[in-house]
Image (cartoon, rainbow, N blue to C red):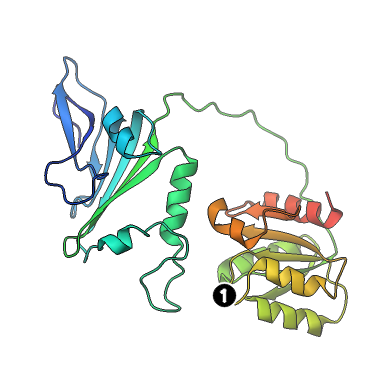
Amino acid sequence: MAWPPGWQQAGATRAPGAGSHPSVYSTVHVVPLPEPPTVKVTSTPADHSTVVLEVEVDAELCQNQLDARPGPHLLLSVTDTGVGMPEGVLSRLFEPFFTTKGPGRGTGLGLSIIYGIVQQGGGFVLVESDPGHGSTFRIYLPAVSEKPVAPAPIVEPDLPKGSETILLVEDEVLVRSLVSKFLQSQGYRVLSAARGSDAIQLAAEHGSRIDLLLSDVVLPNMNGRQIYERLASTMPKLRVLFMSGYTENIIAPHGVLEGGFHFVQKPFSLKELARKVRDALDGR
């Protein structure tokens, strides 16, 4: 819905009695304007649990939120009616691999990934939650006034091909199938595995040269770097290309962003994958 005529959102302020979390802001001030505004507010018609606003991040909010910067922002506010979270969970909410789920039911990476993406975009996240009263997540992203400029059309060269043998390690079935079929269409021979132990066994059974290990970074029983080190001990000429959909703060501890390893960020286009594979094989 649109703001009523003559009104516009002016900024965020701390709500009196909003709970025990000092960095949570849950109301807005509005001020009259002489002309109709262009600000729009939309929400889900069912339960109004999701709202998008244009807001001005003010100095008061920045004093309580270290990664906040003053200026116009887009605010995405999502509220649920779940069981809520105690302070002990809130304090570790965006910590990589932290989860309240049982073994095998969650990686503890979902919220950490969201936090990393928002930070990379220059934004920040505020969370309000109390046991028995649900949770509210507020994502602030800097507003951009410049209009995007359409790039000039580019004539793309043919995708690079090859005939080498590639060992693909990817635990997502659909991704593994798509990547395998595409690489085969480019002339490569592809051996596919869902986890590290399967990949090592498959390489041993293959018994001949493997030119490239194309592996996800975060895998069930060993990470991509560990798989590469195991295989390289018997295949010293093996080249490697790591891939991951996680942000840098999550994959950095796995040691794949150092040592000159080739890396491709998910989601990637097939064109980008073809180029990265060829670069890794050619040692570029």
Q: Nearer the viewer, residue 177 or 155?
A: 177
**Which residue, given by chain and number where applicable, does mark 1 sit on?**
220
Can residue 247 be seen at all in this image of the molecule?
no
Q: Is residue 70 left or right of residue 263?
A: left
What is the count of numbered marks?
1
Name the residue at the top extreme: 34
Q: Residues within 10 Å of mark 1 (few under 14, many from 20)?
A: few
Residue 83 figure quarter:
bottom left
Q: Is residue 116 left or right of residue 265?
A: left
Position of 184 relative to 263 (above/below): below
Name the residue: 19% across, 51% down.
Answer: 20
Where is residue 158? Give x, y as percent: 78, 46
Name the residue: 75% across, 54% down.
Answer: 259
Q: Amino acid at mark 1?
A: Pro
Name the residue: 43% across, 71% down.
Answer: 106
Can residue 206 be seen at all in this image of the molecule?
yes
Where is residue 122? Give x, y as percent: 45, 37
Where is residue 172? Give x, y as percent: 56, 69
Residue 214 figure quarter:
bottom right
**Local SS, label 1:** loop
Position of 173 relative to 114 (above/below): below
Where is residue 65? Give x, y as percent: 34, 40
Q: If the image is split into quadrants, where does the N terminus sit?
A: top left
Name the residue: 80% across, 83% down.
Answer: 204
Residue 88 figure quarter:
bottom left
